[in-house]
Image (cartoon, rainbow, N blue to C red):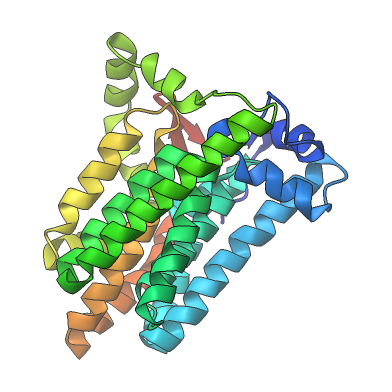
Amino acid sequence: MFSSQMEAKVFNFGFYHLSLNPWTNSTPLDQFLTPWFLWVSRLVNRPEDVVLILDCITIFSGVFLVMYFSHRVHWSFALGLSFLLSSSPLFLIFQTWLGFSDPITFLLISLYLILLYSELKTKLKVFLLSLVLFLGQTNHFFQVLAIVSVLNVSFLIYHKEKIKELIFVMMLAFFMYVLFLIFILNHTAIVWNQTRVSVFSQMWGKEFIRMNTSEPFLGTLGLFHGLWPVVLFLLIRMPISILAFVFCYLISMLTYDTGRVFAILTTPIFILFSIENWRKATISEQRVWYFLTILSPLICSFYPLFYKWDGKIIFLR
């Protein structure tokens, strides 16, 4: 479904070179984990290996999510979740933006979401959440911080008693990240090079307006593609979710790769609200949600798929 022509693909060969030695001043500090992981794995012998490894991580993340929530929620919910993931813009992005750190970000956010709903003892749960958040910050600092912040707030809407735990998680993870920065900057050749900050600083004024006012119809359609019926159903059932999605869109407006960033930000939020909706829904409402999830891949087959980048619509084929 997400097969694309070569012109629609975006290749990142930088991580191949960094996987040979991630301890250089060329390593982006805000994306350290991916090249370090590839280096530790010793599985990278050519650029294609990077893509293959990250593809395997993507598949594992999706399967792990479906399997866990099949056990934690219900098998029929998990089946619907598999339809959602398989037709989501996130997996479209993973099949077109190759060699980027996003699959590891998705894996860590998936683990974070799973831990939120786990029944582990409090201390162990807090430690694991903090560890996952810390690792996420070393892989994609700003993105993970935004995702986890929205996830936590959304989760607390339905589980207010967890507020102290999640505050402690954020504090502990931030403390671990500070220690990480101190070590990296003082004991390796890696330098302070927060690339995201430099990108943000170039996007104000006319550039910002150009990117975010072009292609309004297709740009909006491409935010969710076949998931739109499910999204609208959730927005009606859970109006508070509107704020979460709007926040994610505002963040994505600050980047050139609007569709990619929005997909990464919203997918875990989308899953969380789907879980809470399922738990509160009647049998008939669950069936409606399930039916809409089945429609998602069908809708994606009705028109040529695309994503938005730099204010332009890029068709897969």
The part of the image, by quadrant, that contains residue 185 is top right
Apparent side of residue 3 relative to residue 121 in the rendered image (left or right) = right
54 above or below 162?
above
191 above or below 162?
above
Apparent side of residue 41 relative to residue 75 in the rendered image (left or right) = right
**x and y percentages locating residue 234 in the rendered image:** 21, 65
**Quadrant of the frame with the N terminus:** bottom right
Q: Is residue 7 visible in this depiction of the protein?
A: no
Residue at 45% in and 18% down: 198
**Quadrant of the frame with the C terminus:** top right
Residue at 27% in and 11% down: 205
Residue at 51% in and 24% down: 195
**x and y percentages locating residue 309 in the rendered image:** 45, 29
The part of the image, by quadrant, that contains residue 101 is top right
Apparent side of residue 22 relative to residue 141 in the rendered image (left or right) = right
User: Furthest residue to the top?
Assistant: 206
292 above or below 303?
below
155 above or below 29?
below
Q: Choose between 105 and 138: the one closer to the eye.
A: 138
Q: Is residue 71 visible in this depiction of the protein?
A: yes
Q: Choose between 317 and 183: the one closer to the eye.
A: 183
